[in-house]
Amino acid sequence: MNGKEKGDGEIVEISKEGVRVFAKGFDEPKGIVFIEGHLYFSDLDCVWKVDKDGKTGIFVKKDDFPKEVLYLNDVAVDADAKGFYVVDMGATKYMRDEKNNLWPLDSDEAKLVPELGRVYHVDLQGKVSLVQDTSPLMLNPNGVGLDNNNNIMVTSFFLGNVLVNKGGELAPLKGVFRGADGIEQDSSGNYYVSSWSEGKVWKINGKTEEATVLIDGLKSAADFYLEEHNERLLVPDMLSGIIYAVDLNK
């Protein structure tokens, strides 16, 4: 994302040869997926598409969404790899106090956080559809992923809810994970959740819903990549500019 200067965001490639800028000219690039030879990623109120040579273009613009979008964030490939989900966090300016801390959940200010967050699906023709409308359980949604039954999972950044499919609708797991960012589920049914504001990553037992901290002490644990065949998460500490390999079996 770099700073707040317009157009200073970049896509960076990390390989055995080192680190290089693959594409640039974005504002605040966030969630990213790879489908059929192209990268797709969110950027405030639009979605970009990048080819193998780093050529860029806006794939979905703000006016293509069925509702007003305010702050696009995480993305996740759909079950058929024929499109992806993208989260709109809604109005993020109400979440924090003057010191940039999240308001306490029992505060008067917390009651003023509006229900504006939604989840959309985008197909590879650029058609956008609403798949999860606003909910009091989903204030400022951030992370999105698919569970083992191809149902969406969503994290609520402000409330700390981790929402998964229960009986055909999204409902929270046990516990509060404020600043919740990325979410994934492994093949054994365990969930993984990061918290940007707490600098932690948890492993949540899929049956008991008990949470274990896999790593903490980070400045900002952002959305991660579950690399199950290597038994690790790749977790970026956004404010530190570091990517950690985190053992799944702690």
Image (cartoon, helix red, strand yellow):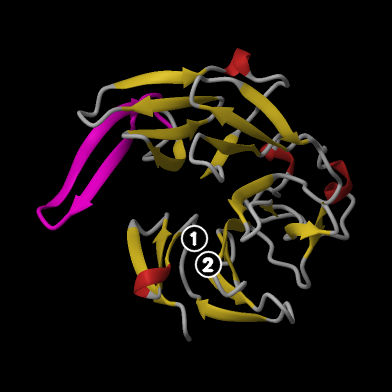
Closest to the observer, 64 or 190: 190
Taking the image as shown, residue 182 lies to the left or right of residue 149, namely left
Q: Main secondary structure of the magenta part?
A: strand
Q: In the rendered image, which residue does mark 1 sit on?
A: 220
Query: Is residue 116 part of the magenta span, yes or no?
Result: no
Q: In the rendered image, which residue does mark 2 sit on?
A: 199
Percent coordinates x, y for residue 126 in the rendering: 52, 20
Closest to the observer, 20 or 232: 232
Range of residues picked out in magenta: 4-25
- How far apart marks 1 and 2 lie (CA) works out to 5 Å
Taking the image as shown, residue 67 lies to the left or right of residue 27, namely right
Image marks 1 and 2: residues in contact by CB distance under 8 Å:
yes
Percent coordinates x, y for residue 180 in the rendering: 63, 59
Mark 2 lies on a secondary structure that is loop
Label 1 or label 2, whichever comes before in sequence order: 2
Whether residue 44 is situated above or below residue 155 in the rendered picture? above
Whether residue 71 is situated above or below residue 66 in the rendered picture? below
Q: Residue at x 59, y 52 (%)?
A: 145
Closest to the observer, 86 or 198: 86
- The type of residue carrying mark 2 is Gly
Closest to the observer, 144 or 129: 129
Residue farthest to the front, as pictured: 80
Percent coordinates x, y for residue 213 in the rendering: 57, 80
Percent coordinates x, y for residue 39 in the rendering: 36, 35
